[in-house]
Amino acid sequence: MMARFFAQRVIIGKMAYKDIPATLKPGVAEILNDQGLQHLIEV
């Protein structure tokens, strides 16, 4: 649930992927990939 919250914040531009807590990054990345928004993930 928290991963979805942070993914939504990345999508709307309120937060950058790099600022997400490390423990949530895999889940957020999966959500962004599923929505075709891989470009929002900074490696």
Image: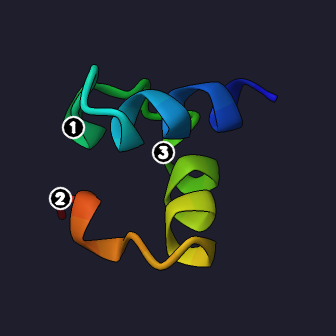
Q: CA distance from mark 3 to mark 1?
A: 9 Å
Quarter occupied by the C terminus:
bottom left
Tag 3: residue type?
Lys
Q: What percent of the width, then of the height, locates residue 16? A: 22, 33
Tag 2: residue type?
Glu
Residue at the farthest right position: 1
Q: Residue at x 39, y 43 (%)?
A: 11
Q: Please give the residue where the numbered disc 3 appears in the rendered image.
A: 25
Q: Residue at x 65, y 35 (%)?
A: 3
Q: What percent of the width, then of the height, locates residue 25? A: 48, 45
Q: What percent of the width, then of the height, locates residue 41? A: 28, 60
Q: Which mark is residue 42?
A: 2
Q: Quadrant of residue 19?
A: top left
Callout 3: SS: helix
Q: Residues within 10 Å of mark 1 (few under 14, many from 20)?
A: few
Q: Which mark is residue 18?
A: 1
Callout 2: SS: loop
Apparent side of residue 2 relative to residue 26 in the rendered image (left or right): right
Q: Which mark is residue 10?
A: none
Quarter occupied by the N terminus:
top right
Apparent side of residue 36 relative to residue 19 in the rendered image (left or right): right
Tag 1: residue type?
Lys
Q: What percent of the width, then of the height, locates residue 24? A: 57, 36
